[in-house]
Amino acid sequence: MDTTAVLLSQPSVIGLADVDLNPMGEEDALIDVHWTGISTGTERLMFEGTMPDFPGMGYPLVPGYEAVGEVIAAGPRSNRCVGETVFVPGSKGFRSVRSLFGAAASHLVVTGARAIPAPASLGDKAVLLALAATAHHALVRAGTEPGLIVGHGTLGRLIARLALALGKTCPTVWETNAARRSGAFDYPVLDSGEDAERQFPCIIDASGAANVLDTLIARLAPRGELVLAGFYDERMSFNFPAAFMREARITIAAEFQADDVEAVLRLLEEERFSLDGLITHREDANDAAQAYGQAFGDPQCLKMVLDWRKLS
């Protein structure tokens, strides 16, 4: 069986292509994908050719780790059922191309454990489960409550929302882009120059900017913690004396775990947490190349979703 997928044939060259799927095994499920999200972090690095050399990296490449669809076939040992709505955080089910994450396709073959049941009522908002789980993981990794979140993109917003949903002290959010500071939020969103606070016990950085360490360390309280929740493609360095005087701790929050997804789904079910208002742009998968360009180039685009249901 083949499928239509987003294919990065080389850096800066993206479009749709037919690719071969691996045959299903007894533990696998076949997913008819309805929506996929575009990551302005990792997928941008793949597009620009600056993604670090992770296992599976190379071209041609199917990107993406935010797919939502329906199970249309299930192996006898997959623990999945035909008709289930599932979230798929990536796939390696292609025969002829590389797949670092590999979820941006009309159909996917994945192990049943890789297909996570999700409420059908979420619709395309379910593509945000990966980022929401990443946000939850960052909060769990933090040793204390975050007083400051840096970056008010999708990830920063999710961290702030989850902090409040989990009953933590209302954090402050810094954002350099004035357009992303506007709106009614349940927490203050400031330019860093407007914030006089210099004693944050914990700061979570969701900006992905490699040059922020010195600025953030200078705002830590003694023995404070800086959690790096973004993805950084450049070498990071910091002023050691400033960190030394504070006995600063630097923590890296990496890939989310299954219990992070479960926690987010539980908060959604209990209506303590919402994914509303984070998807700002939607395009048919037929227009994937245009959608990727807008997702990477338009600062007003928080999250772009591709709709695969009308693929021609």
Image (tube, grey):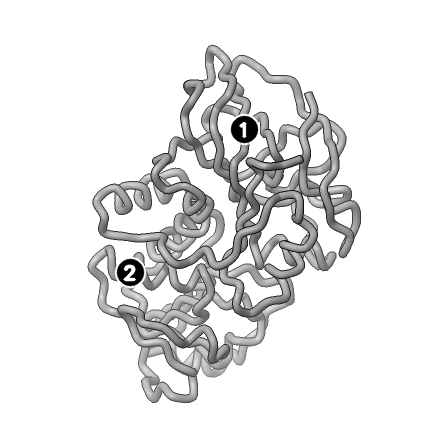
**Which image quadrant for residue 294?**
bottom right
Label 1 CA crowd tier, 10 Å (few <14, some 14–19, many 20+): many
Q: CA distance from mark 1 to mark 2?
A: 34 Å
Q: Height in image: 127 above or below 200?
A: above
- Quadrant (top left, top right, bottom left, bottom right) of the N terminus: top right
The foreground one among 259 and 65 is 65
- Which residue shows up at 44% across the image and 59% down it? 155
Q: Height in image: 256 above or below 165?
A: above
Mark in front: 1 vs 2? 1
The foreground one among 104 and 134 is 104
- Quadrant (top left, top right, bottom left, bottom right) of the C terminus: top right
The foreground one among 106 and 256 is 106
- Which residue shows up at 74% across the image and 49% down it? 14
Work out whether mark 1 precedes mark 2 in sequence or the reverse, and give the earlier one: 1
Residue 10: % across, % down: 79, 49
Residue 223: % across, % down: 34, 73
Viewed as shown, does residue 208 lie left or right of 144? right
Which residue was labeled with disc 2? 163
Residue 6: % across, % down: 68, 42
Residue 201 at least partly seen? no
**Which image quadrant for residue 105?**
top right
Which residue type does callout 1 highlight?
Asp
Number of labelled discs? Answer: 2
Residue 97: % across, % down: 74, 35
Residue 32 at least partly seen? yes
Q: Height in image: 77 above or below 196?
A: above
Which residue type does callout 2 highlight?
Ala
